[in-house]
Image (tube, rainbow, N blue to C red):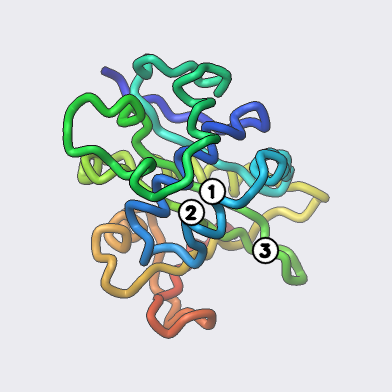
Amino acid sequence: MTVVFRRLTPQDAVLYRLIRLRALVDSPHEFSSTFTRELAFTLDTWTVRLQNAEAATFIAYDSPPPDINLDGETKAVGETLEWKTPDEFALPTTHDDRFAAYKGMITCIRSFESPYEDAFVVGFWVLPAARSQGIGRTLVNHALEWAKSHDGDNIPFKRVLLDVVKNNVPARRAYERCGFVVQGESPEDAKEVRYVYKIR
């Protein structure tokens, strides 16, 4: 199969929810949010996130993904709205996981702080079985290309920032291969390192 990368649209809200919740189950210590918190989000919350013109979310998936339509309207994806426990989102160890076609996700979003010239990479996750295959690096590059070309409100980005847990060596290596350099300890969390990628 070929791995395809594309940007999510508001019509992908159910699929977005599915991948995000599975990421939170798989790697709970790598995110500032929690599965329990985001499980309670309404579908409108996920849709609004994807409607944000100052953000872009990209996914990686096998083409064609088995049994799942990417518009998020089939039963295979729609039924996940009824799931309530982490076990239902956990990654099966068997080969028959219907959702294993979805390999990873990343979001790049404009900073909420003036002068609004920074973009942040958030929500970066790659399926464990798909790691060390270049998928993470390609997702990061898609986020960077969006940041380089986006000039919403005529304010082009000057930098892309991200925070990563200090001992998350695979993620750190992926960022460094894409051109990020360590800026120092994250001002948000002493357990994290802040990386910066300069655009201008």
Residue 37 image position (x, y, % from top left): 55, 59
Mark 1 neighbour density, 10 Å: few (under 14) some (14–19) many (20 or more): many
**Vertical comparison of 42 with 24: above or below:** above
State which tag comes first along the sequence, 2 or 3.
3
Alpha carbon distance from label 3 to label 1: 12 Å
Contact, mark 2 vs mark 1 (Cβ under 8 Å): yes
Kindly identify which numbered label has been placed on residue 123: 2
Contact, mark 3 vs mark 1 (Cβ under 8 Å): no
Residue type at the position of mark 3 = Ser
State which tag comes first along the sequence, 2 or 1.
1
Mark 2 neighbour density, 10 Å: few (under 14) some (14–19) many (20 or more): some
Q: Residue at x 18, y 27 (%)?
A: 95
Residue type at the position of mark 1 = Thr
Query: Does dot 3 land on a helix, a strand or a loop?
Result: loop
Q: Residue at x 31, y 63 (%)?
A: 172
Q: Residue at x 67, y 44 (%)?
A: 42
Q: Which residue is mark 3?
A: 111
Q: Residue at x 34, y 16 (%)?
A: 66
Horizontal side of residue 57 vs 35, given as left or right: right
Query: Does dot 2 land on a helix, a strand or a loop?
Result: strand
Give whichever of 154, 55 is nearer the camera. Answer: 55
**Vertical comparison of 54 with 182: above or below:** above
Q: Quadrant of the C terminus?
A: bottom right
Rendered image quadrant of residue 134: top left
Kindly give the residue lying farthest to the left in the view shown.
94
Kindly identify which numbered label has been placed on residue 107: 1
